[in-house]
Image (cartoon, grey):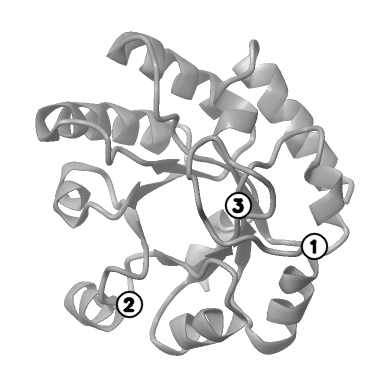
Amino acid sequence: MEKNIFLSGIYPISPMVYESDDIYLELIKKTLKTNIKVFQFRGKHLSLKRKRRLVRKISELCYKSNVKLIVNDDIDLLKLGFGCGLHIGEDKNLKQIRKYFGRKMLIGVSCYNSVEKAKWAESNGADYVSLGAFFPSKTKKNVAHCEPNLIHQAKKIINIPICAIGGIGKKNIKVLLKYKPDMIGIISGIFSQTDVESTTNSLINLMDVK
């Protein structure tokens, strides 16, 4: 599937807290200087006006870098970018969304710590699933914990790419790499670091030699 060319490697997800929109965009530019293939905009904490402004800017940056932009949950933002994909949680209706957008749009689904949810998502039109959290996360509190072996279990029964998420960074990424997730989603492990570009490149190198 053509969409799957984007669904591998390190998957940066936009930070929750930053000093200004300009600094935020500069951080994203630094990640796009690397060889990432996919980037997620997660703006639940932002006003609609700011989300619209940022999505337009980030979409342009991703388009120029040949990186697939995924919008988290906010369906209304999709029309503001260049061929954006969508990532949804269990509060969204995957069947209805897939029917409305057709097969062309890339859709990812959060399945937390459930292989059964991952199988259901694949059967109902998801292009990839995310599993996690594998480690304590600064971004989300009180989330379901996953054992790394869950990736191995999921790979036995689904054929779409699997993204591991939750508290992942350079110190613990190797714990997950031996289970061979297709993607690893990272927020703080990239954007809370002093040198975003160098950190992203280091993570990419670690994943490339898994």
Label 2, secondary structure: give it: loop
The residue nearer to you, when weighing 130 against 135, is 135
Q: Is residue 62 left or right of residue 195?
A: left
The residue nearer to you, when weighing 72 against 168, is 168
- x 25%, y 28%: residue: 54
| Mark 1 residue type | Lys
> Would you place residue 69 above or below residue 130 in this image?
above
| Residue located beneath label 1 in the image | 180
Q: CA distance from mark 1 to mark 2?
A: 27 Å
Q: Are marks 2 and 3 in contact (CB under 8 Å)?
A: no
| Mark 3 residue type | Ile
**Label 3 crowd bin: few (<14), some (14–19), many (20+), radius 10 Å:** many
Q: Mark 2 or 3 closer to N-term? A: 2
| Mark 2 residue type | Arg
- x 28%, y 83%: residue: 95
| Residue located beneath label 2 in the image | 103
Label 1, secondary structure: give it: loop
Q: Closer to the observer: label 2 or label 3?
A: 3
Q: Mark 1 or 3 closer to N-term? A: 3
In this view, the residue farthest toward the front is: 142
The quarter holding residue 109 reads bottom left
Label 3, secondary structure: give it: loop
**Label 1 crowd bin: few (<14), some (14–19), many (20+), radius 10 Å:** some
| Residue located beneath label 3 in the image | 165
| Residue 76 place in picture, x, y as percent | 14, 52
| Residue 63 place in picture, x, y as percent | 38, 37
Q: Mark 1 or 2 closer to N-term? A: 2
